């Protein structure tokens, strides 16, 4: 089957369950075709094209489907058709709401504005046409769209998220039960065990659980609030599993506090999703480090833990040696012998790890990141970053920015 035939079948299949509109754009984002009714097309097209810069910038290097968050809580799925090295078409489905409160919040927002009844009713009539699709199902639609265009099978964690910078109560009876819960429990236990083991294949287990559930089943202030709640629940599970896997409770809880605040500060669903990826990766790597360093002395491990927990503070070899109960000369040799690097080099490496996270997931300026991590100057930070990673902080941000 050709790409056109694949996409036609894909549209027919998803419309069996959700009335999601399909859009085809040229490489310059000129609209070529849409299944959206004419009376709604202009407004929806404007909503998507308000983020055209994000789409075109991502298309330069991106190879996977893009989940795009626009104003009015609309989500879109975009993927790209290439002929060799030339972009030929951008295929999009949307707009989509991911929860009941997506629509409810927009309705309440409209009521707060001084709009005529005619305008308000016209907007609401259009909003009522936007389907509500659970986030886990939206991810599956993105994977299927990519397969129709490229023939490539991908996993949920390969989906990309980009957001702009703008950005009714459940009446189910407590006694009602969901048939999916047993499957979710089994999948969750597999995932948690992988965190305990520091297993680098944890994403496979997480992807399996994502296909079973879209998260905690309650509405508490809209889809972003729900996404934050789900991220915090996952963070708590990771923190406890990491402790059971051998990570120091002090380190695990410090990481939990740090990421909880980052989640609360996130301004969109994609931003929260990126944080979730960072959370899991860091916990797995920390557990893996503890397990592979079983022969490292308690004093050196305690020093590494302290560095992790106080990475934004001034740290000296003299202070760390004194804290461990050794002379500076002896502890420096002991640390290098066991860890394979000097204390100062290890501190720089840990600070660069944190800098990479801040560069790819926040809008903090490079000088602010430098100051946050205790570097004496921006130039020293840039030199150290380039020595460790092989590229400048600005270059790394351009290639890895995820929000």
Image: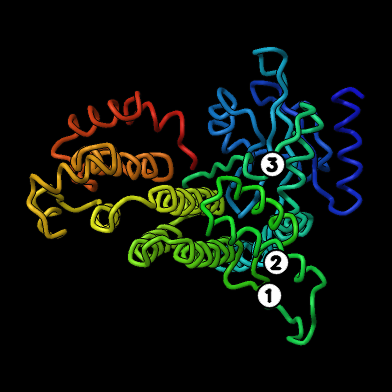
Q: Position of residue 4 (x, y in %)?
A: 87, 26
- The image shows residue 355, relative to residue 191, as above or below, that is above
Asked if labels 3 and 1 touch by Cβ distance under 8 angstroms, the answer is no
Q: Report the front residue among 180 and 40.
A: 180
Identify the image quadrant of residue 301: bottom left
Mark 1 vs 3, N-terminal side? 3
Q: CA distance from mark 1 to mark 2?
A: 7 Å
Which secondary structure lies at badge 3? loop
Image check: 356 left or right of 19?
left
- Kindly report which numbered mark, 3 or 2, lies closer to the viewer in this rendering: 3
Report which residue position mark 1 lands on: 168
Q: Position of residue 12 (x, y in %)?
A: 91, 42
The crowd level at tag 3 (other Cα within 10 Å; few <14, some 14-19, many 20+) is few
The residue depicted at 74 percent of the width and 40 percent of the height is 143
Q: Position of residue 33 (x, y in %)?
A: 80, 30
Image check: 116 left or right of 242?
right
């Amino acid at each position: 089957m050709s790409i056109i035939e694949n996409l036609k079948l894909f549209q027919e299949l998803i419309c069996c369950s959700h009335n999601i509109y399909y859009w085809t754009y040229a490489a310059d984002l000129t609209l070529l075709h849409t299944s959206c009714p004419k009376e709604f097309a202009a407004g929806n097209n404007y909503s998507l094209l308000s983020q055209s810069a994000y789409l075109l910038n991502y298309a330069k290097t991106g190879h996977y489907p893009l989940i795009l968050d626009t104003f009015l809580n609309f989500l879109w799925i975009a993927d790209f058709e290439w002929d060799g090295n030339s972009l030929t078409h951008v295929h999009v489905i949307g707009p989509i709401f991911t929860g009941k409160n997506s629509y409810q919040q927009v309705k309440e927002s409209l009521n707060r504005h001084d709009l005529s009844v005619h305008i308000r009713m016209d907007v609401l009539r259009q909003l009522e046409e936007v389907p509500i699709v659970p986030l886990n199902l939206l991810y599956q639609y993105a994977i299927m769209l990519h397969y129709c265009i490229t023939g490539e099978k991908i996993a949920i964690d390969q989906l990309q998220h980009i957001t702009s910078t703008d950005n009714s109560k459940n009446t189910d009876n407590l006694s009602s039960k969901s048939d999916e819960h047993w499957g979710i429990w089994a999948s969750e236990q597999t995932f948690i065990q992988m965190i305990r083991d520091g297993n680098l294949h944890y994403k496979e287990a997480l992807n399996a659980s994502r296909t079973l559930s879209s998260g905690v089943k309650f509405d508490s202030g809209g889809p972003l609030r729900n996404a934050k709640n789900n991220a915090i629940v996952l963070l708590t599970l990771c923190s406890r599993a990491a402790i059971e896997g051998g990570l120091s409770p002090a380190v695990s809880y410090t990481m939990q506090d740090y990421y909880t605040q980052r989640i609360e500060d996130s301004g969109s669903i994609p931003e929260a999703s990126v944080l979730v990826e960072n959370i899991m990766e860091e916990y797995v790597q920390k557990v893996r480090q503890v397990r592979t360093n079983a022969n490292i002395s308690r004093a050196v491990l305690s020093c590494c833990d302290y560095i992790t927990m106080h990475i934004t503070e001034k740290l000296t070899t003299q202070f760390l040696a004194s804290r461990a109960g050794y002379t500076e000369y002896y502890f420096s040799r002991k640390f290098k012998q066991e860890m394979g690097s000097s204390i100062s080099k290890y501190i720089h490496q840990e600070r660069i790890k944190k800098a990479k996270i801040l560069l790819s997931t926040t809008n903090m300026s490079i000088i602010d990141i430098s100051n946050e991590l205790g570097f004496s100057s921006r130039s020293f930070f840039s030199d150290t970053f380039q020595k460790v990673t092989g590229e400048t902080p600005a270059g790394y941000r351009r290639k890895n920015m995820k929000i």
